[in-house]
Amino acid sequence: MDKLVGQLKKRLSGRVDSEMEAKKILSHPEVQSFRKQHPHLPEKVYYRSLVQLRQLVREREHCKHCPGLEKCPNLMEGHQPHIQWYGGYIELRLAPCEKMIALEMEKKRKNLIQSHYIPEDIVNATFDQMNWDPGRVAAIEAAMDFCDQFATGSPKKGLYFYGPFGVGKSRIAGAMAQYLVQYGIDSLMVYVPDFIREIKDSIRDGMLSDKLETLKKATVLILDDIGAENITPWTRDEILGAILQYRMVYKLPTVMTSNLDLNELENHLGHSEKGGTERVKAKRIMERIRPFVDVYYVDGYNRRAN
């Protein structure tokens, strides 16, 4: 056995400079841990794999003194080697390091939040940066409780925030989208007036069906400023009605913000920009809203005016 090990050492002398280097490699904690897990492997296996083990040690030392992902000196950026025993040989398996995992998680979190015509300060809002004014406390607590229910299931109802201009209804909804990320929940927030204008143009570009499917199937849909859009029978019945019907059937919660209370929203939906009143159809839409939201009045000073 000693003779064989000696031959292997000699054969590898051009690749591994010295016995001292070999001992240093074999005494590395990662190698020692592997040896304890595989006590049946003879020493010749490790000498036969000194080149791979040298790469392991070198890259693990890089990781101990990590210069950051952008300057990662490892063979594969953001990855570190692990020893594995495969087919009678020691091989290296590359796996993402903690920094790469954190980066990928951050990308995933950002992908979970989608927004449509929503200002950046609203999309990036968080509860810990929010002023808990008396007129907003109940709404903020309800918003956080809604999100926390995803820890064990999903909320049975959505939320309807209404109140004067500029009191922070949209900001609360935006903070919900950020908060939902910790539970791995996707959300889609759309500014309803601009979305309605866009949806009319989607008929020409053939994207109407795809856009509707996106809103229908979002785990949490946030309809911002509903009631401020110019309504037509088509957008009310075929767009808003279709979205809410799907979400009602599949029990997907919807969050809404508005300047109107539910009665005022019903009146709004009963009138169209082309004139006329359709109370029955407005009530039909409201039957897809009223039973499926908890309602909160949001009050305070107009932050946009200050």
Image: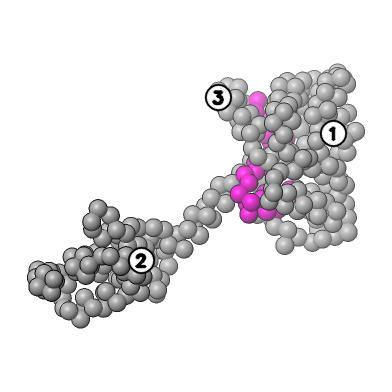
Q: Residue 190 appears in which quarter of the rendering?
A: top right
Q: Earlier in the sequence, mark 1 or mark 3?
A: 3
Colouring of the image: one colour
Q: Tell us which disc is closer to us: 2 or 3.
A: 2
The mark found on residue 205 in the picture is: 3
Residue 51 visible in this rendered orientation of the protein: no
Tell me: 17 left or right of 61. Answer: left
The residue tagged 2 is 37
Image-quadrant location for residue 186: top right
Q: How far is disc 2 from disc 3 in space, using C-alphas?
A: 61 Å
Q: How many marks?
A: 3
Mark 1 and mark 3: Cα distance apart in space: 34 Å
Q: Residues within 10 Å of mark 2 (few under 14, many from 20)?
A: few
As drawn, the residue found furthest toward the bottom would be: 20
Q: Secondary structure at mark 2?
A: helix
Task: State the SS at label 3.
Answer: helix
**Within the magenta stretch, is there residue 180?**
yes
| Neighbourhood count class around disc 3 (C-alpha, 10 Å): few under 14, some 14–19, many 20 upward | few
Q: Which residue is mark 1?
A: 290
User: Residue at image x 23%, y 56%?
Assistant: 88
Q: Position of residue 250 (x, y in %)?
A: 69, 31
Q: Amino acid at mark 3?
A: Asp
Q: Earlier in the sequence, mark 2 or mark 3?
A: 2
Q: Which residues are magenta?
A: 171-200
Q: Are marks 2 and 3 in contact (CB under 8 Å)?
A: no
Which amino acid, mark 1? Arg
Q: CA distance from mark 2 to mark 1?
A: 62 Å
State which quarter of the image contains the C terminus: bottom right
